[in-house]
Image (spheres, rainbow, N blue to C red):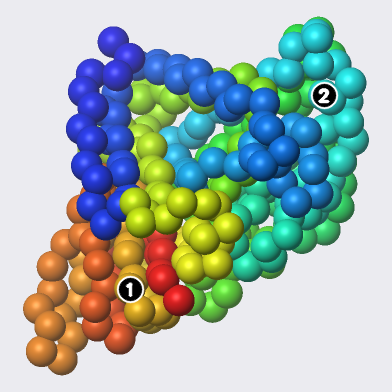
């Protein structure tokens, strides 16, 4: 059946496509080869600047495959001989990375087959971390979003990418590899109530350049584990949040509780809001300085 329905909502300049799926589904994304203006500061030819973007889901796995093809074999070899830290070497060190965000929390490596890339692994070559195919010049990365699995929370803490409030940096990429990207999901391996994924993009309508986006806005994320609270502090003059699942807010002072639903963005106006313990998921937080 593949994708059975798609609902698109744009709120606070965050555009989210919610795709409900059955069985297996595959999406193909091809990022154009960049002009000089669209390249990263370090001029890596493998990347193009894009609006901030990410995929979200709650449970299950995602298989991602980058295919350079035979006509770009030199770029492919250069790519797989770089480390994640080298690929993330971008001018802006607080937001807008190519190899950051959610991936270090969920990617399965060849080193230990567990989800997550530790700080020490980020100095290993891509060829050491992931399945690389010299026939079609591709890299395949499996990503695991089953945050409720036994021992998952403890393992993610050991990676060195979450703080005590389950905060992590840069959940949305601003650079995409300009190779054919294939993303695959199988609903049979997702929770029955969570058989969907979200394509999320952010680029404020009043901005004209990527430099403005990097200068005016920042981003972070939180992993919300079941049976744990997460407190989200307001960080800027305008704060926006969106999630991968239905997450409840605890009543707070004169504020009522409620539920943040996935598939759309919300504005955070109070100084802090606390999410209750009822569910797990990913929270994305954007704020204007």
Q: Determine the residue positioned at 55% across, 52% down.
A: 210
| Image coordinates for residue 231, horizontal then vertical, percent | 36, 78
Q: Determine the residue positioned at 27% across, 73% down.
A: 268
- Label 1: which residue? 238
- Residue 253's quadrant in the figure? bottom left
- Residue 199 lies left or right of residue 109; in this view the side is left
Residue 65, can we see it?
A: no
- Mark 1 falls on what kind of element? strand
Q: Determine the residue positioned at 50% across, 59% down.
A: 213
- Label 2: which residue? 76
Q: Nearer the viewer, mark 1 or mark 2?
A: 1
| Image coordinates for residue 13, horizontal then vertical, percent | 31, 52
Along the line of sight, which residue is nearer the eye, 11 or 208? 208
- Mark 2 falls on what kind of element? helix
Question: Mark 2: few, some, or many residues within 10 Å (few <14, many ≥20)?
Answer: many
| Image coordinates for residue 25, horizontal then vertical, percent | 40, 17
| Image coordinates for residue 212, horizontal then vertical, percent | 52, 60
Question: Mark 1: few, some, or many residues within 10 Å (few <14, many ≥20)?
Answer: some
Residue 92, can we see it?
A: yes
């Amino acid at each position: 059946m593949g994708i059975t329905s798609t609902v698109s909502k744009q709120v606070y300049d965050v555009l989210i496509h919610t795709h409900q799926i059955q069985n297996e589904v595959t999406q193909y994304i091809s990022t154009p080869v960049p002009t000089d203006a669209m390249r990263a500061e370090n001029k890596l030819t493998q990347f193009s600047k894009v609006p901030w973007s990410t995929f979200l889901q709650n449970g299950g796995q995602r298989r991602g495959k980058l295919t350079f093809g035979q006509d770009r074999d030199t770029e492919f070899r250069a790519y797989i001989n770089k480390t994640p830290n080298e690929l993330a070497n971008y001018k802006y060190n607080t937001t807008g990375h190519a190899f950051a965000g959610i991936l270090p929390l969920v990617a399965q490596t060849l080193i230990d087959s567990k989800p997550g890339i530790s700080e020490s692994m980020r100095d290993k070559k891509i060829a050491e971390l992931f399945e690389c195919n010299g026939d079609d010049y591709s890299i395949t990365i499996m990503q695991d979003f089953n945050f409720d699995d036994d021992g998952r929370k403890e393992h993610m803490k050991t990676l060195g990418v979450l703080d005590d409030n389950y905060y992590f940096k840069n959940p949305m990429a601003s650079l995409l590899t300009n190779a054919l990207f294939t993303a695959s999901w199988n609903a049979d391996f997702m929770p029955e109530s969570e058989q969907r994924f979200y394509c999320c993009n952010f680029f404020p309508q009043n901005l004209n350049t990527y430099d403005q986006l990097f200068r005016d806005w920042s981003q972070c994320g939180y992993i919300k584990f079941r049976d744990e609270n997460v407190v989200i502090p307001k960080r800027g003059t305008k704060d926006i949040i969106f999630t991968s699942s239905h997450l409840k807010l605890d009543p707070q002072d004169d504020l009522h509780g409620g539920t943040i639903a996935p598939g759309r963005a919300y504005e955070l106006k109070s100084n802090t809001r606390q999410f209750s313990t009822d569910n797990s998921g990913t929270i994305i937080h954007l704020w204007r300085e």
